[in-house]
Image: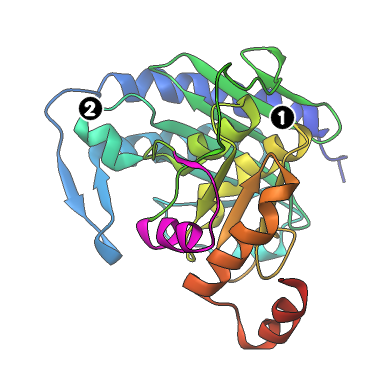
């Protein structure tokens, strides 16, 4: 049996596929699109489907032993028996893509035994390629990804759903409400760049929304976790996650985690544990 590729080799494959996918996607961007709505009111466009088919062909041809999990593909339970699995969102931020906003991304990852080991978040229109593989650090456009807080920022910049903002204000947190980029993957990456100080996801984010960000944030030294369950695990039978938070400042952890737990709750067997951990 041939040995598995290294995480760095998988990253190289993801990067190449993301660039080509980005070229294909920009051919549909800001043009008349066929769009429709799928389950839970989530939008999808013809570009999502075209990219999904391209990525499936490109990636699984290169790694036929890997499983496949994509937002735009029917789930195949065979992935659960594969040690490594591609986790793919052909266009993360489809609503923004349809509206003509430029921060949508191609988000690709490889998970091994439930842990993301390689990932890319590519924003073609902004010409930004975020990437990382386990143990190799995080990069932005080929250079080490370094967090730089813009000069003059007086308070943490945090985008979040309205209910979470209300809870943070009630808790007395001094912060500024940040921009809500339609791509969750892109939003999470901005915590690593310094454009944001924290980013959250309401309960129900899927593997393909966050797997690439998980390895990039980890390699950039940014805390990213499920506020109830802790470290994220991928390629399980259940692909949805609880409320998530990425934090550049550990001091934000107690109040932000507490707000998310209060708004979205935790699985019953975790509630007592969370009550002990929160102030």
Relative image position of residue 127 (x, y in whole percent): 47, 13
Asked if residue 141 lies in the magenta stretch, the reply is no
Q: Secondary structure at mark 1?
A: strand
Frontmost residue, 73 versus 202: 202
Residue 279 in the figure: left or right of residue 204: right
Asked which quadrant contains residue 141, the reply is top right
Frontmost residue, 64 versus 175: 175
The reply to whether dot 1 and dot 2 touch (C-beta < 8 Å) is no
Question: Tag 2 or tag 1, which sits nearer the N-term?
Answer: 2
Residue 100 tag number: 2
The segment highlighted magenta reads 162-177
Q: Work out whether residue 186 can be spotted.
A: yes
Q: Work out whether residue 240 can be spotted.
A: no
Relative image position of residue 211 (x, y in whole percent): 62, 47
Q: Which residue is mark 1?
A: 132
Determine the CA span between mark 1 and mark 2.
28 Å
Residue 95 in the image: above or below residue 133: below
Residue 64 in the figure: left or right of residue 1: left
Residue 87 in the figure: left or right of residue 42: right
In this figure, what is the number of numbered marks?
2
Tell me which colouring the rendered structure shows: rainbow
Frontmost residue, 53 versus 247: 247
Residue at image point 52% right, 43% down: 175
Q: Quadrant where the C terminus lies? A: bottom right
Relative image position of residue 38 (x, y in whole percent): 25, 59
């Amino acid at each position: 049996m041939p040995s598995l590729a290294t995480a760095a080799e998988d990253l190289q494959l993801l990067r190449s596929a993301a660039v080509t996918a980005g070229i294909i996607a920009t051919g549909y961007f800001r043009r008349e699109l066929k769009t429709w709505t799928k389950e839970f009111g989530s939008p999808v466009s013809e570009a999502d489907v075209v990219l999904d088919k391209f990525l499936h062909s490109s990636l699984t041809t290169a790694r036929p032993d890997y499983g496949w999990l994509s937002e735009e593909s029917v789930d195949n339970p065979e992935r659960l028996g594969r040690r490594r699995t591609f986790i793919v969102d052909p266009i993360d931020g489809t609503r923004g893509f349809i509206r003509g906003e430029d921060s949508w991304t191609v988000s690709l990852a490889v998970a091994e035994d439930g842990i993301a080991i390689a990932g890319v978040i590519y924003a073609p229109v902004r010409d930004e390629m975020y990437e990382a593989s386990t143990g190799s650090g995080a990069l932005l456009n080929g250079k080490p990804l370094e967090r730089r807080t813009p000069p003059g920022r007086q308070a943490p910049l945090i985008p979040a759903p309205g209910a979470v903002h209300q809870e943070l204000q009630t808790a007395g947190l001094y912060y500024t409400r940040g921009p809500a980029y339609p791509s969750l993957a892109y939003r999470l990456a901005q915590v690593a760049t310094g454009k944001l100080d924290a980013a959250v996801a309401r309960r129900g984010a899927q593997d393909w929304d966050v797997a690439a960000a998980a390895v990039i944030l980890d390699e950039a030294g940014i805390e990213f976790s499920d506020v109830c369950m802790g470290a994220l695990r991928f390629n399980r039978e259940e692909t949805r996650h609880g409320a998530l938070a990425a934090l550049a400042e550990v001091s934000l952890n107690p109040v932000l985690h507490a707000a998310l737990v209060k708004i979205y709750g935790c699985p019953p067997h975790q509630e007592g544990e969370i009550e002990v951990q929160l102030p």
